[in-house]
């Protein structure tokens, strides 16, 4: 009694219960780290989207733009930025998971993929909470924050979360094998912020360049989220939610394949 078997399982506990216990412990550890890692860490979870929305809203106010694509500018900016952060924060947290949890891999029940999946799930939960707080704040200022099609909005955010998971899975392996790639990935995130239509409408881009930009799955997700949030929004004709999910599934499959191929190397870095 109390001894582990040769395969790492504890007698009297099923593999499913062991996995559930590991994931719960990892989730609580990650949650405490994210919220209490530094003074007012919870504040910075809200500060980034609030600052970005406020900054861009100020610029749009200066040039007297009150609607974008038939939607209130505040809601257009807020939905777009929250959707982008769903992707970016998930991708960033997942890609950095291995280097942040190396000490845990001495336990045979904990695999690198476990920490990535838990981090991704935690980030989705945090983004839902942040989105709720920001939209509630917008409602207090008289803006309509009730989605016209809640399921379409949920579908768009879920697709962006899956793309973030896929990106993070691939990047987590790539940056462990070639650390210099981490700098390149961080460098790419800024232009991605622009070309995804976060602050400038994709519809304003002429053809054929607009069609090229819509190969970006993040741009697809943002257009889908805004379209679902307001029935007055005029999405670009290239919007294809199926492409968003196809890209997500391919990237997740590739990431899982890389983790399986380099499993031993990832825990012995």
Image (cartoon, grey):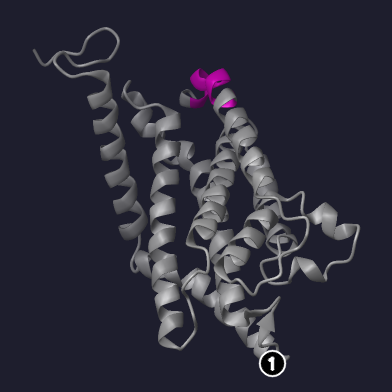
Q: Is residue 36 left or right of residue 190?
A: left
Looking at the image, the residue that sits furthest to the top is: 6
| Residue 182 in which image quadrant | top right
- Residue depicted at 44% across the width and 59% down the height: 127
Quadrant showing the N terminus: top left
Which residue is nearer to you in this view: 177 or 86? Answer: 86
Q: Quadrant of residue 4?
A: top left
In percent of width and height, residue 90 lies at 51, 50
Task: State the residue at coordinates (59%, 25%).
Answer: 258
| Callout 1 secondary element | helix
- Res. 180 in view: no
Q: Nearer the viewer, residue 26 or 13?
A: 13
Visible residue check, residue 35:
yes
10 Å neighbourhood of mark 1: few (<14), some, or many (≥20)? Answer: few
Question: Magenta stretch: residue 155 in it?
Answer: no
Q: Is residue 184 above or below residue 166?
A: below
**Residue found at x 68% / y 62%:** 193
What is the count of numbered marks? 1
Kindly identify the residue that appears in the image at 45 percent across and 30 percent down. Answer: 113
Which quadrant of the view contains residue 243? top right
Extreme residue toward the right, this view: 208
What predominant SS class does the magenta segment belong to?
helix
Which residues, given as a range, are shown in magenta? 258-266
Whole-percent x and y of residue 211? 84, 55
Horizontal side, residue 50 vs residue 240: left or right: left
Q: Which residue is mark 1?
A: 62
In the rendered image, residue 261 lying in the magenta stretch gets the answer yes
**Position in image of residue 76 (x %, y %):** 61, 74
């Amino acid at each position: 009694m109390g001894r582990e078997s040769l395969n790492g399982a504890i007698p009297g506990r099923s593999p499913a219960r062991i996995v559930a216990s590991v994931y719960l412990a990892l989730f609580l550890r990650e949650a405490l780290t994210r919220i209490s890692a530094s003074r007012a860490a919870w504040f910075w979870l809200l500060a980034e989207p609030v600052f970005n929305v406020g900054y861009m809203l100020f610029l749009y106010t200066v040039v007297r733009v009150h609607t974008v694509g038939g939607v209130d500018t505040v809601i257009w900016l807020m939905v777009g930025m929250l959707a982008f952060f769903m992707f970016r924060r998930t991708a960033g947290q997942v890609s950095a998971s291995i280097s942040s949890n190396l000490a845990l891999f001495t336990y045979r029940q904990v695999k690198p993929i476990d920490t990535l999946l838990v981090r991704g799930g935690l980030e989705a939960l945090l983004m839902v909470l942040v989105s709720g707080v920001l939209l509630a704040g917008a409602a207090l200022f008289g803006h309509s924050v009730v989605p016209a099609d809640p399921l379409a909005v949920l579908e768009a955010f879920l697709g962006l979360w899956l793309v973030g998971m896929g990106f993070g899975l691939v990047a987590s392996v790539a940056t462990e094998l070639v650390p210099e790639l981490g700098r390149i990935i961080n460098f790419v995130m800024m232009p991605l912020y622009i070309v995804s239509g976060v602050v400038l409408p994709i519809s304003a881009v002429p053809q054929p360049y607009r069609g090229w930009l819509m190969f970006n799955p993040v741009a697809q997700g943002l257009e889908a989220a805004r379209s679902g949030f307001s029935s007055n929004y005029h999405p670009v004709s290239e919007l294809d939610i199926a492409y968003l999910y196809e890209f997500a599934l391919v990237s997740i499959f590739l990431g899982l394949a890389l983790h399986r191929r380099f499993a031993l190397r990832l825990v012995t870095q």
